Amino acid sequence: MWNSRALHHLLLHSFFLIASVSAQRSNITSAWKTLSGSPPLVIARGGFSGIFPDSSKDAYSFAILTSVPEVTLWCDVQLTKDGAGICLPNIKLENATDISAIFQNKSTNYLVNGIPTSGYFSVDYTLKDLSSVALTQGVFSRSEVFDGMLFAILTVDDLVKELAPPGLWLNVQHDAFYSQHNLSMRNFVLSVSRRVIVSHISSPEIGFLRSITARFNPKTTKLVFRFLGQDDKEPSTNQTYGSLLKNLTFIKTFASGIIVPKGYIWPVDASLYLQQHTSLVSDAHKVGLEVFASDFANDVSFSFNYSYDPLAEYLQFIDNGDFSVDGVLSDFPITPSEAVDVELSSYDADCFAHLGPNAKKIDNTLIISKYGASGDFPACTDVAYKQAILDGVDVLDCPVQVSKDGIPFCSSSIDLIDSTTVAQSSFSTLAATIPEIKPTGSGIFSFSLTWDNIKSLTPSILNPFGTKYKLFRNPKYKSVGSLLTLSEFLSLTKNQTSLSGIVIIIENAAYLADKQGLGVTDSVIDALSKAGYDKPGAQKVFIQSTNSSVLNKFKEKTNYERVYKIDETVGDAATKAVDDIKRFASSVVVNKNSVFPRNTGFIIGSTNTVSKLKSSNLSVFVETFSNEYLSQAWDFFSDATVEINSFIQGSDIDGIITDFPKTANRYRTNKCLNLGKNTPPYMQAVQPGALYGLITDNFLPPAVAPLPPLSDSEVVEAPLPPVSKITPAFSPDSGTKPGTQPKGNAQPKVIGCFFLSSLAVLENVLAESRMMIPDCHKRLEASLADLKGILAELEESGEKEGPEIDEARSTIAEVEKVIETSEA
């Protein structure tokens, strides 16, 4: 089952266009505040275990291919019944292998550090027994598709012989356990060190390290004491690790360094916000101990201060101005490799470390905001816009909505439920269903409220991955700031010399003109003129829309640049469609999947979309680049910087649209750009479809249909209708007047509006309850009672089926479960 691997390894090596870099580190004066003054060590835990099964050959190979030249491979050593040392991340084999399927019902019970533990243990199997066992992905939130490759369990000798790692780190987690089973970890490490070069040996057991300290030369092999939780007890001394932390001079008697969970250095509070860093690194350095930080992974929640940007977290530990740790242990070694400067005789590339606040921009790709810095603050608020400017955005966006009294303002959506607490306000009764602008569900729309009503609302931060995945954005600041009128937005932007332009986004213009009597295009033209944007020397103005009719009107009346947004996912564009776009626009916005299409989260290739549009001299902007790892394909390793780099270097786009402009702007200043053949592997564009090509047939997802091309019929539209004169309706049911009762079957529609409003309220409160807002329990109970009552009325009136009814029943069940759990 292990043969015929040549093709697989060819695909693996082609993932990056690896530059041939084999030179040794040069003698350049270092700015690092590590103990030695050398760059921090990048330690790949189980190899590239964020993608491949931990400790598999491909995980280790991929770590070498995608990391700094001196990457160190981490092996958690377990001992078999016959004394072989194997690399497995957990003492319980079933957590990282398929052993429970191979040896069914063979689990045993042992004491591990004094705790009764049930599972499959290596002490019960010989190396030959384990030859039929394959490694699997042990983290359930990660893709298991590479389990089908049936990776063999590696011995330490196999690892060194097959891969010749630049550095090898052996972690001995359970020496006491193996001693109980008459197996000597001490004898093993002494024996293996005679055959291979081991750069580091770590253990959380003082007795083990003291037993081998005299046998190793620290210039060749460094011993490292591993700290566990501060309240956990070290088995040799029976002292807590927290108390041992106060006696670093004692640790220096048997170790060259310590490895600690990252919270020992930069603690976070219960709300996941950073606290002041401790003095641990400087204290350890004073006594001559190196400090390595562990627990780094790109695909888990970490401090909100990092805005879901894993590179920002690494930089906080190695380039904060006060200290630098001596190494980081990561499941995704490509990211700390980006952070660490690489000084080779062939080139000197600082990448992202030591850039400083005034770093020069090397790449000129436009950075366009998505509702300002809406990844950190409520969308389209003054706070989000000011932060985006500070973050280095080039073009600031304003999606224009119009209030009932005709005031244009900036808001991420025409439905105010999306970005404010309107559903929890007295205006919740204005909920309505309007399929022309919101095909499914209800909303409370901007044209139903006056500007005075709207500006009284509390903004609410967008949480695109909150409800389903519990990845919430910056909860401490989820309601700060104020919405701006278009005029206020233009006053904010006009004198910002760092901005090269603004983009005004217009949608639903035909509906607003015809059904609501609101002329959004004329309002925008008037506001821009009054702000002086139609005068020579003003910042560039982009007008963006999915409707060619809107852009054609601006073409007739103004000289502003026009941007056509393709709201479908397309794999190409018909020549006639491109010719039509050129008649009214000079730029096009496409989504990421129109550039690199995916299947079950993996990129399956690249399309002709960008090249086709650019061949007709159309600029191409791509959206939306978010920092949350769930927004990215597996191929980008849960790292926003890898994704940005791959789109800019791999598809020749002109601009990116992002809700985290700070991350995108930092990318443009990194010194690993424009290095040509010397570009390090971790700063090269990923190869589209390379990871997908490694998936074995039995794990391949069903094939997806090819993406359709953009057709001419999707581009051409009738002109905008004239603005109609409409008398405002009294209620969401336009047939109902004050003092009258609705006719016929109109009543269920009115109840439906209140019902949909109550459902929106309940869903908002439920989302907050997951974030542990203090008064949520009472609000949940009140909203639940309201929704149950309205649902009962609807059912009595004969409305017992429908998507909204089903959604309400599902929400009621979920809320009842939440309340029941909180009362338990």
Image (cartoon, rainbow, N blue to C red):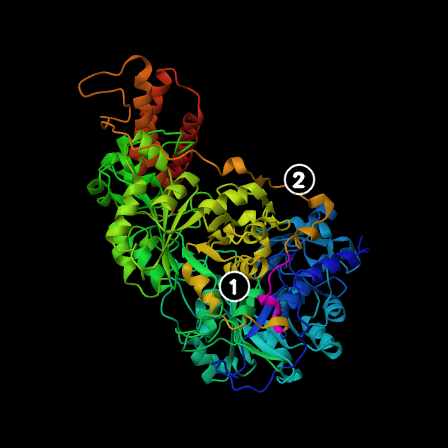
Tag 1 residue: 296
Tell me the tag on residue 687: none
Point 58% across, 50% down: residue: 612
Residue 307 visible somewhere in the drawing: no
Tag 2 residue: 702
Locate residue 300 relative to residue 268 in the image: left or right.
Answer: right
Q: Nearer the viewer, residue 366 or 202?
A: 366
Q: Is residue 792 in the magenta section? A: no
Q: Give the distance between the C-alpha atoms of the residues marked 1 and 2, in whole angstroms.
A: 33 Å
* Element under disc 2: loop
Residue 522 visible somewhere in the drawing: yes
Q: Residue furthest top?
A: 744
Q: Amino acid at mark 2?
A: Pro
Point 58% across, 65% down: residue: 334
Q: Nearer the viewer, residue 396 or 122?
A: 396
Tell me: residue 7, above or below residue 763.
below
Mark 2 crowd level (few <14, some 14–19, many ≥20, 10 Å Cα): few
Tell me: residue 661, above or below residue 409.
below
Where in the figure is residue 788, as x and y percent of width and height? 34, 26
Q: Give the magenta-colored segment's residue range.
A: 678-687
Q: Is residue 682 in the magenta section? A: yes
**Disc 1 vs disc 2: Cβ atoms closer than 8 Å?**
no
Q: Amino acid at mark 1?
A: Phe
* Element under disc 1: strand
Tell me: residue 461, above or below residue 672.
above
Magenta stretch, main secondary structure, is loop
Q: Residue furthest front?
A: 556
Locate residue 319 relative to residue 459 in the image: left or right.
Answer: right
Locate residue 772 relative to residue 564 in the image: left or right.
Answer: left
Where in the figure is residue 120, as x and y percent of width and height? 67, 53
